Image: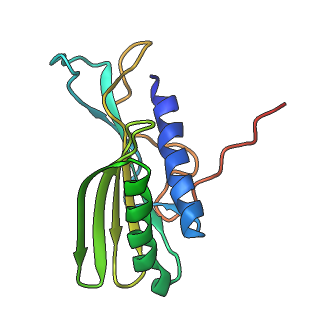
Amino acid sequence: MATDEAAESVQSQGLEIAELAETQLVWGFGTPHVLKCTGKGGEDTDRIYSYLAAFELYPPPDRSLPFGMDLHEQWKSAGWRIAAYKEIPDGLVLLTTNPSNDLQVRLDVFGDGRILLNISTPCYEQPDGPAPFGAQYYSGAQEGEPVPSPAPAES
């Protein structure tokens, strides 16, 4: 899968979660990154990568914790692989994998209402040459800026 397709997949997952939270998805600390990773067979080439993006959600503070708890139950019922779920004072941490696309999702809910969302892909192989490792600087991918919704498909 090409890195632009991976980026689109991660952003779509983030936008879906923001819609469930009834709030806007905002780019989090840093920018999206293309990270080097090792293939399933132990391959270590400049074509195998993982895409990671950090986002923030700002639902009403009294809605954040119930949202995280509800999302945990919803994903568990839908067959998502829950790697970790821990309620902490005034918050929670949820680490899971979406079975339909293998994206790993980490949701951190804080007592002040903030939700940090990290989404990463499994390792993919860039089909047309080396992967562009490092920070991905492109329009709109700046901390605190809203993540744009994808353009509607032309019919």
Rendered residue at 50%/38% (across/down):
9
Provide residue 49's location: percent of width, then percent of height. Answer: 31, 28
Rendered residue at 38%/85% (across/down):
112
Is 155 located above or below residue 32 in the figure? Answer: above
- Does the image show residue 134? no
Is 130 located above or below residue 35 in the figure? Answer: above
Is 34 located above or below residue 19 in the figure? Answer: above
Provide residue 126's location: percent of width, then percent of height. Answer: 39, 19
Q: In which quarter of the image is the N terminus?
A: top left
On the picture, is 132 further left or further right than 87? right
Rendered residue at 81%/32% (across/down):
154
Provide residue 57's location: percent of width, then percent of height. Answer: 48, 68
Q: Which of 18 and 2 is in front in this view?
A: 18
Q: Which colour scheme is used?
A: rainbow
On the picture, is 124 further left or further right than 71? left
- Does the image show residue 17? yes
